[in-house]
Image (cartoon, helix red, strand yellow):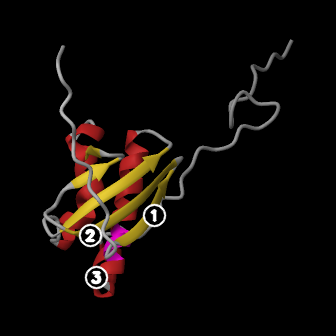
Amino acid sequence: MPTKKKETTLKVPSDNWYGTGRRKEAVARVWIFKGSGRFQVNGRDVCDYLPSEMLRQIAASPLDKMGVLDKYDVKATVKGGGMAGQADALKLGVARAILETDASLKPELKQYSFLVRDARVKERSKYGKRGARKAPQFRKR
């Protein structure tokens, strides 16, 4: 029987910075603290959690663009939504946490639009319709 290797989870020290990110139905709570560049999501490494390289780049893009990718460790918990929504929620949470570390980075973070929450969410279903907009089939005769 193969033995499962136990992953070490990051412990959040008291000198940490926090940011919350949301996108569609996904909510990310992000803590960053001084470290070597480890990135954990829901207790797993980001490479194991997010399936594609593109989503991992999206989640870590604020750290990368600010040039602090290897200066901070990131621990995040994400709930709800799909993988793309969770990656965007992580991006916003990381950007807000970086802003807490150094307020002078705000113009640069705004320039890359990391501090803007994407407000597009699923439209509600209306009564008399088959979804948000699709109407039932119309018969003339």
Vertical comparison of 108 with 8: above or below: below
Looking at the rendering, the stretch of residues picked out in magenta corresponds to 95-99
Quarter of the rendering containing residue 106: bottom left
- Circle 1 crowding by C-alpha within 10 Å: few under 14, some 14–19, many from 20: many
Residue drawn where x is 34% and y is 68% of the image:
95
Q: Secondary structure at mark 2?
A: strand
Kind of residue indicated by mark 1: Thr
Which residue is nearer to you in this view: 28 or 53?
Answer: 28
> Furthest residue to the right?
141
- Residue 74 position, x and y percent, is 27, 60
Residue drawn where x is 29% and y is 54% of the image:
59
Residue at numbered disc 2: 33
Residue drawn where x is 18% and y is 33% of the image:
5
Which residue is nearer to you in this view: 97 or 42?
Answer: 42
In whole angstroms, how far apart are the C-alphas of marks 3 and 2? Answer: 17 Å
Can residue 1 be seen here? The reply is yes
Tag of residue 20: 1
Kind of residue indicated by mark 3: Leu
Q: Secondary structure at mark 1?
A: strand
